[in-house]
């Protein structure tokens, strides 16, 4: 399986799994945030871990731990409306944002806010892609995540890392 397809499958699994978190858990947002962060962090860690199976496994382990901690912190504090605003800012930045120029968002109800800084467009396997950094401020402390999204054939932006 090609690396892109593997990443796409793993992200789809993470999305479905996050929706299926234990409804009786006292911290369902935190649980799904930790799980999604760990999965994405593990994938990124394996991808940048270097050559050789040992380096990739070590990179995946470090990435999974870091991603789980960041995802847990974000999931514990943001509610659905906050996440929707953050997602809308990501889509605005990916679709219309100038490279290097932040697209901000701020909750009217909570103290959470953030910004998305898109990178330049580039072509990858015939698709339009761009990297981005999304920084979310939780209780005044920044939590930053980097990612890459590519335009799907139906026009939506899909995170690929």
Image (tube, rainbow, N blue to C red):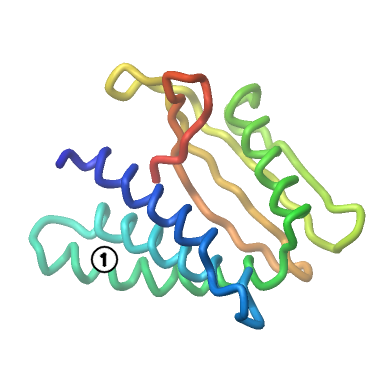
Question: Mark 1 — residue?
Answer: 59
Among all residues in the image, which is located at the extreme front?
24
Q: Would residue 156 be found to the left or right of residue 56 on screen?
A: right
Q: Would residue 127 be found to the left or right of residue 113 on screen?
A: left
Give me the residue at 23% from left, 60% from top: 49
Relative image position of residue 97 (x, y in whole percent)? 65, 26
From the viewer's side, name the closer residue of 133 and 89.
Answer: 89
Relative image position of residue 84 (x, y in whole percent)? 71, 47
Among all residues in the image, which is located at the extreme bottom?
26
Neighbor class of circle 1 (other Cα within 10 Å; few <14, some 14-19, many 20+) is: many
Relative image position of residue 105 (x, y in whole percent)? 78, 45
Image height of 117 relative to 152, above or below: below
- Element carrying mark 1: helix
Res 95 → quadrant: top right
From the viewer's side, name the closer residue of 142 and 39.
Answer: 39
Res 139 → quadrant: bottom right
From the viewer's side, name the closer residue of 18 and 7.
Answer: 18
Give me the residue at 55% from left, 66% from top: 33
Q: How many marks?
A: 1
Among all residues in the image, which is located at the extreme left?
52
Image height of 161 relative to 59, above or below: above
Quarter of the image with the N terminus in it: top left
Relative image position of residue 107 (x, y in whole percent)? 85, 53
Q: Is residue 129 visible in the rendered structure shown here?
A: yes
Q: Is residue 70 visible in the rendered structure shown here?
A: no
Give me the residue at 51% from left, 20% from top: 155
Give me the residue at 25% from left, 59% from top: 46
């Amino acid at each position: 399986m090609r690396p892109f397809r593997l990443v796409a499958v793993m992200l789809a699994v993470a999305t479905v799994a996050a929706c299926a978190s234990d409804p009786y858990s006292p911290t369902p947002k935190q649980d799904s945030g930790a799980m999604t962060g760990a999965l994405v962090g593990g994938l990124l860690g394996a991808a940048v871990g270097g050559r050789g199976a040992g380096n990739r496994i070590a990179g995946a382990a470090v990435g999974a731990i870091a991603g789980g901690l960041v995802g847990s912190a974000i999931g514990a504090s943001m509610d659905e409306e906050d996440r929707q605003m953050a997602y809308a800012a990501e889509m605005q930045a990916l679709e219309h944002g100038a490279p290097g120029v932040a697209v901000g968002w701020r909750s009217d109800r909570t103290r959470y806010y953030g910004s998305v800084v898109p990178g330049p467009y580039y072509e990858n396997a015939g698709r339009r892609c761009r990297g981005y950094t999304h920084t979310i401020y939780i209780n005044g402390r920044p939590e930053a995540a980097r990612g890459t999204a590519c335009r799907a054939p139906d026009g939506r932006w899909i995170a690929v890392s």
